[in-house]
Image: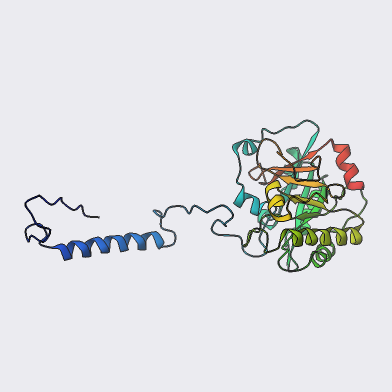
C-alpha cells in the first residue's frame, strides 16, 4: 500500500498541498488491496499461503468418498514425526508388514517380500457402496509372494449400521479361512476424513456401532475383528471405552518411535502402524511378536 507522509504541524489535514489527490490515493490503495485478495483467492496461485487448520478441522482437500485409506484421518489430524519416517523403531521380536488400498494400484509384492515384509492387509470395502478395484491383485498377490495376508474395512458409521457394514465387508473380501495364511479382518475406525471427527455420533452411540460391527463380523466369520484406531480418536469418540480389549486385537496407529499410550482395555498392541512414508508402499507396520505368533493369529 502507498506510504502516507506525516502531516507537518503547520498543515491542516485538509490543506490542498498535503492531500491534493486524497481520492486518487484511496482508490489506488483500495485497488491494490482488492488485487491482492483476488490473487490469494485464485486457485493454484503460487503466492497463496498454506491454510492453517484449527484442531479437529479437515485439511484441504479431503479424499473423495470411497477413497479413504487406513490412516487417512490419522495423517490429517496427528501428522507424522520424523522418528517414524526414518523407521528407527523397536525391532525386537517384530515382523514387518504393510497395508495398501486402491491408491497403490497393482503392488510389486516380490519387491516387498525381498525387502523383508512378511504380512499385508489390503482395503476391501468402505461403508456399503465401495469395493477396492485392486483388491484381487493385492490380496492374492501378497498371498502368492509368500506373505500372510488379510483384508480391512474402512468404517463410515454415519452411513449405515455396524451390522450392515460388517456383512458387506464379509461378503466382499473380508472373510476368513483357516489356511495359515489368512489373518482376521480389520475394522478401520478412525478420524472421519469427510467431515465431523466422530461421524456425528455420541460416544455411547459409537461404542454401540463398533459392538454391532464386531459381533456381526464374528458371527459371520468365527473370528474377532482386529480394531485399527488411535488413542486420541478412541478417547474422543468412544470416551476411551475399555470394553473391547479382551476380545479384539488392537492395531494402533502412531507415526513415531513408539506406539505410545494405548486406549483403555488393551494391555498391549498386536499391530502398530508406525509410518505412512515407508519404502515401496507408504504405510509400514510392525507385528508385536515373532513370526510363529503371527501364524498363530492367522490360524485362530
Residue sitting at x 63%, y 35%: 83
Seen from the viewer's position, the closer of residues 140 and 234 is 234
Q: Left of 15 or right of it: where is 74?
A: right
Give the percent coordinates (x, y) of residue 171.
Answer: 84, 65
Q: Residue furthest top?
A: 92
For the N terminus, which image quadrant?
bottom left
Q: Is residue 284 above or below residue 26?
A: above
Is the residue 20 above or below the residue 230 in the image? Answer: below
- x and y percentages locating residue 189 in the rendered image: 73, 55
Report the front residue among 291 and 205: 205
Instruction: Say which quarter of the image contains residue 82.
Output: top right
Name which residue lies at 61% across and 60% down.
63
Residue 229 versus residue 68: which sits nearer the camera? 229
**Residue 97 x %, y %:** 76, 43
Q: How many marks?
A: 0
Identify the residue shown where x is 67% and y is 51%: 71
Residue 108, image x and y in percent?
71, 48
The image quadrant of residue 81 is top right
Amino acid at each position: 500500500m502507498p506510504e502516507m507522509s506525516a502531516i507537518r504541524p503547520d498543515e491542516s489535514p485538509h490543506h490542498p498541498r498535503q492531500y491534493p489527490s486524497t481520492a486518487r490515493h484511496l482508490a489506488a490503495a483500495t485497488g491494490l488491496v482488492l488485487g491482492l485478495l483476488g490473487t490469494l483467492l485464485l486457485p493454484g496461485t503460487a503466492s497463496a499461503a498454506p491454510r492453517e487448520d484449527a484442531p479437529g478441522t479437515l485439511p484441504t482437500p479431503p479424499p473423495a468418498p470411497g477413497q479413504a485409506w487406513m490412516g487417512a484421518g490419522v495423517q490429517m489430524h496427528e501428522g507424522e514425526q520424523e522418528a517414524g519416517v526414518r523407521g528407527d523403531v523397536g525391532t525386537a521380536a517384530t515382523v514387518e508388514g504393510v497395508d495398501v488400498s486402491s491408491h497403490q494400484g497393482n503392488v510389486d509384492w516380490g519387491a516387498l517380500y525381498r525387502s523383508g515384509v512378511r504380512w499385508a492387509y489390503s482395503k476391501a470395502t468402505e461403508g456399503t457402496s465401495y469395493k477396492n478395484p485392486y483388491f484381487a491383485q493385492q490380496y492374492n498377490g501378497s498371498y502368492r509372494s509368500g506373505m500372510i495376508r488379510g483384508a480391512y474395512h474402512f468404517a463410515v458409521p454415519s452411513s449405515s449400521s455396524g451390522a450392515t457394514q460388517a456383512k458387506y465387508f464379509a461378503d466382499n473380501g473380508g472373510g476368513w479361512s483357516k489356511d495359515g495364511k489368512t489373518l482376521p479382518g480389520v475394522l478401520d475406525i478412525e478420524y472421519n476424513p469427510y467431515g465431523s471427527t466422530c461421524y456425528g455420533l455420541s460416544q455411547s452411540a459409537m461404542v454401540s456401532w463398533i459392538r454391532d460391527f464386531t459381533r456381526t463380523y464374528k458371527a459371520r466369520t468365527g473370528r474377532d475383528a482386529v480394531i485399527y484406531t488411535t488413542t486420541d480418536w478412541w478417547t474422543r469418540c468412544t470416551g476411551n471405552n475399555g470394553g473391547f480389549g479382551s476380545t479384539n486385537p488392537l492395531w494402533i496407529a502412531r507415526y513415531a518411535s513408539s506406539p505410545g499410550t494405548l486406549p483403555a482395555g488393551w494391555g498391549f498392541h498386536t499391530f502398530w502402524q508406525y509410518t505412512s512414508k515407508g519404502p515401496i508402499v507408504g504405510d509400514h507396520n510392525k507385528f508385536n511378536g515373532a513370526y510363529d505368533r503371527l501364524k498363530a493369529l492367522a490360524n485362530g
